[in-house]
Image (cartoon, helix red, strand yellow):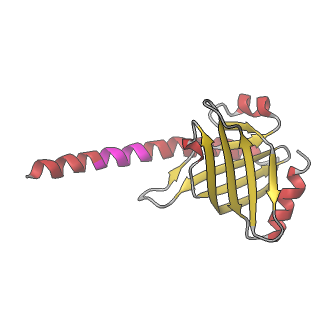
Amino acid sequence: MIEPIIGFSIFLTLVVLFIRNTNNSLEKEYDIIIESLNDNLKLFIEQAKCSNTTLGINNRGYLFKNCDLYLTNDALIIFGYTKDSFFKQLSKPIILTKEITKYKNKFSFAIVKYFENIVYNPNDKYIYIKFGEVGLTETFVKFKIEICSESDKNNIKLITDNF
C-alpha cells in the first residue's frame, strides 16, 4: 500500500527537479540576452498577458500565457512564461528581427524568426504579432499581447515601423 505513495513522491520530485533545472538554464539564457541589450534597449514591458495560436509542427516553444517584451532598434525579444502551475515555467527566448544572421550567430540558443508585422487595433488594448509559415517543418504563430499603456503601444508601433 505504501509503494504507490513512494513511487508517486519520487516521480513528483523528479518532475520538480527537471522543471527547476530547465528554468535555471533558461534564466541564464535570458540574462545573456538582457546583458547584451543594455545599450540598445528602447522599450521594456514587463508581465504582459499573452494568448497565442500556432499552426504546424514544432509549436511547443510558443505556448505561454505571460511575457516580457524587450524592444531594440532592430529586434523584438519575447521572454514567455506560464504561472499557472506550481512553478513558473519559462519558454525559450524568441527574437523577431529582420537581421536574422546577426541574432542567430550571437544567440544560437534562442528562437530567431523573421519579423513580419505587428497589427495594431486602435479600438482595443492588444497588439497582434504574426510570424512563421504553416508546414510540416515550420510553425505559423500569432500572438495577442495585452499592452495596457497607450503610449507603450504607440512606441512599439513607432520603433517597429523602422525595422
Question: Residue 161, position in %: x, y?
Answer: 90, 51
Q: In this view, does 77 lie to the left or right of 162?
A: left
Query: Along the line of sight, which residue is nearer the eye, 58 or 21?
Result: 58
Vertical arrangement, residue 55 with respect to residue 122, above or below: above
User: Which residue is farthest left?
Assistant: 1
Whether residue 153 is in magenta: the answer is no
Q: Residue at the location (68% across, 53% down)? A: 143
Question: Residue 37, position in %: x, y?
Answer: 76, 45
Q: Residue at the location (72% across, 28% down)? A: 105
Is residue 89 something that shows in the picture?
A: yes
Q: In this view, does 12 lie to the left or right of 7?
A: right
The residue segment tinted magenta is 12-19
Q: Quadrant of the C terminus?
A: top right
Residue 115 position by quadrant: top right
Q: Is the magenta stretch mostly helix, strand or loop?
A: helix
Q: Is residue 144 left or right of residue 102?
A: left
Vertical arrangement, residue 101 with respect to residue 132, above or below: above
Is residue 36 something that shows in the picture?
A: no
Question: Residue 67, position in %: x, y?
Answer: 63, 56
Residue 48 position by quadrant: bottom right
Whether residue 13 is in magenta: the answer is yes
Q: Residue at the location (82% across, 47% down)? A: 40
Q: Is residue 49 left or right of residue 85?
A: right
Query: Along the line of sight, which residue is nearer the eye, 45 or 35?
Result: 45
Q: Residue at the location (58% across, 41% down)? A: 59
